[in-house]
Image (cartoon, rainbow, N blue to C red):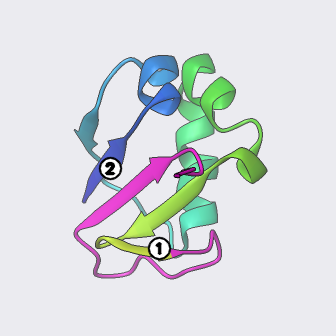
Amino acid sequence: MDVLYFAWVRERIGIPKEKVETTAKTVAELVEELKAREERYAVAFSDLSALRVAVDQELTDFDASIEGVREVAFFPPMTGG
């Protein structure tokens, strides 16, 4: 699946997008796998309350299933005006 990183998440990890092979069943499990890779991932995902996630371009929660999905995106909360 494609994993996309936006804003400060991208800055901390150092790439905007990557293909990931995973056995994770949920977004939370995927995050744990990513955090175990390298320190930069652990730093980026250290505070999940500061992150939002979309699965196949639909906002969702970290307990959402990722089985069969094509894309998971991580980004900070958006503010607008």
Query: Which residue does the image show at 72% across and 49% down from the upper left?
Result: 48
Instruction: Note whether 19 is above or below 38 in the view shown.
Output: below
Q: Is residue 77 left or right of residue 48?
A: left
76 on left or right of 11: right
- Whole-percent x, y for residue 52 in the image: 57, 57
Q: What is the x, y in percent for residue 70?
A: 22, 69
Mark 2 and mark 1 lie on one chain; the one further toward the N terminus is 2
Image: 68 above or below 17: below
Tell me: 43 left or right of 75: right
Q: Do residues under tags 2 and 1 come within 8 Å of each other at their CB atoms?
A: no
Q: Position of residue 32 (x, y in %)?
A: 64, 49
Marks 2 and 1: which is nearer the front? Answer: 1
Alpha-carbon span between mark 2 and mark 1: 14 Å
Magenta highlight range: 60-81
Name the amino acid, label 1.
Leu
The residue that label 2 is drawn on is 3
Residue drawn at the location 55% of the way across and 73% of the way down: 26
Identify the disc placed on residue 59: 1
Which residue shows up at 65% across the image and 38% down it? 45
